[in-house]
Image: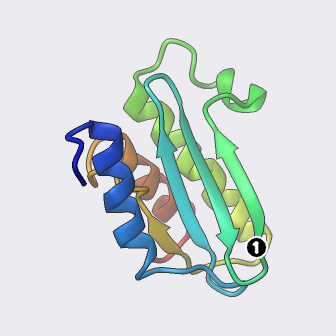
Amino acid sequence: MSSSNGKTRRIVRHDRLRSKISGTAQRPRLAVYRSISHIYAQLIDDDGGVTVASASSLEDELRGQTTGSGKILISKIVGESIGKRAVELGISEIVFDRGGFKYHGRVKAVADGAREAGLKF
């Protein structure tokens, strides 16, 4: 880790996290990525190498609910959306992957929204 670049450090943290956690068909990994403007969440089965479900702040159905809202509120709505989709697929337990980001703010809001929708982790 020779560079003190923030993105590089996040990727190193994420690699360290990913060495310890993995998603399965029964308990997929909820991967969260936050960009400057948007937030993305995916349920991933690492054993099968497939994305089971996804949600993001770019989706048309979520954009209608989030106009003019703050980023944290939008993130919570994305978390609730991915949680509802998981419950519809019969998934109740997940492994949370914060993507190397600190567990606060928008990343925490996604987790809280997913918990409110009925996911356990």
Q: Residue 38 appears at what percent x and percent y? A: 53, 29
* Residue 61, placed above or below residue 14: above
Farthest top residue?
A: 68
10 Å crowding of disc 1: few (<14), some (14-19), many (20+):
few
Q: How is the image coloured?
A: rainbow
Q: Position of residue 14 (x, y in %)?
A: 39, 61
- Residue depicted at x 62% and y 79%: 92
**Which residue does the image show at 67% across and 28% down from the upper left?**
58
Instruction: For the N terminus, give its image quadrant.
Output: bottom left
Location of residue 28 (image quadrant): bottom right
At horizontal 46% and vertical 50% (from top left) the residue drawn is: 110
Q: In this view, does 64 lie above or below 7?
A: above
Name the side, left or right, on which 22 lies relative to 91: left
The location of residue 111, given as percent across then percent down, is 43, 57
Return the x and y of residue 68 as percentages of the image width and height.
Answer: 49, 12
Residue nearer the viewer, 59 or 15 = 15
Which one is in front, 53 or 4? 4
Work out which quarter of the rendered image holds the C terminus and state it. Answer: bottom left
Label 1: which secondary element:
loop
The count of marks equals 1
Q: Is residue 99 left or right of residue 64?
A: left
Q: Which of 8 and 66 is in front in this view?
A: 8
Residue with the mark numbered 1: 49
Residue drawn where x is 39% and y is 53% of the image: 11
Amino acid type, label 1: Gly
- The image shows residue 112, relative to residue 30, as above or below, that is above
Location of residue 48 (image quadrant): bottom right
Residue 28 shows in this picture: yes
Residue 101 seen by the camera: no
